[in-house]
Amino acid sequence: MILKVLLPKQVLVEEEVRKVIAEGQNGSFCLLPRHIDFVSALSPGLLVYETAVGAETYLAVDEGVLVKCGPEVLVSTRNAVQGADLGQLQALIREQFAELDERERQTRSALAKIEADFVRRFLEL
């Protein structure tokens, strides 16, 4: 099977795999090459795949959609982080969340300034 993990701005993974394990809204499932065509809404969590050489790789994925059609498994999600082991993946996720929290704080600060300026200008009228 060919696994493609698609993010809004890039293709994170595109490689041949033996097995894909993911978590849908109805529970976990495993896809093997002869599995029937399949569509599932993904829950935030882990997606594990076994490469053609037998190595397991972990992806932390946000909500998304998984589609298996013939030999292709397509995963579309807004955000995903790849790691070789769970410890490394946990560190990467914490780093990303800290970065997102900082961006969110900056955005809220800028929005508050815009709102305050709008109210001030409106009162001047």
Image (cartoon, rainbow, N blue to C red):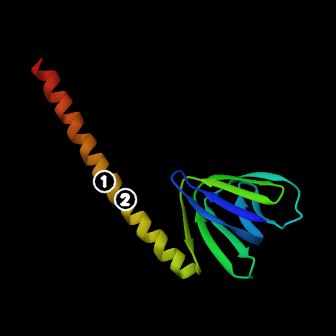
Percent x, y of residue 91:
47, 76
Quadrant of the rendered image containing residue 6: bottom right
Residue 57 placement, left or right of 98:
right
Judge whether 61 appears above or below 88 on screen. Answer: above
Circle 2 residue:
101
Nearest the camera: 40 or 112? 40
Image: 55 above or below 96 = below
**Distance Cα–Cα, label 2 vs label 1:** 6 Å
**Place of residue 97 in the rendered image (x, y in percent of width and height, measured from the top left):** 43, 64
Compared with 47, 118 (above or below) is above
Dot 1: what SS? helix
Q: Which mark is residue 41?
A: none
**Residue found at x 53% / y 75%:** 89
Q: Residues within 10 Å of mark 2 (few under 14, many from 20)?
A: few
Query: The C terminus is located in which quarter?
Result: top left
Q: Nearer the viewer, residue 18 or 86?
A: 18
| Kind of residue at badge 1 | Arg
Is 48 displayed left or right of 121 in the figure?
Answer: right
Identify the element where label 2 is drawn: helix
**Nearer-the-camera pick, 84 or 122:** 84
* Front in this rendered view, residue 71 or 26: 71
- Residue at the spot 75% in from the left edge and 60% down from the top edge: 27
For label 1, count other residues whose C-alpha is less than 10 Å away and answer few (under 14), some (14-19) or many (20+): few
Percent position of residue 23, x then y: 70, 62
**Label 1: which residue?**
105
At horizontal 31% and vertical 53% (from top left) the residue drawn is 105
Residue found at the far top of this picture: 125
Query: Do the residues under discs 2 and 1 have CB atoms within 8 angstroms?
Result: yes
Could you say where residue 94 lies in the image, as x and y percent from the top left? Answer: 44, 70
Task: Give the amino acid at mark 2.
Answer: Asp
Residue 66 occupies which quadrant of the picture?
A: bottom right
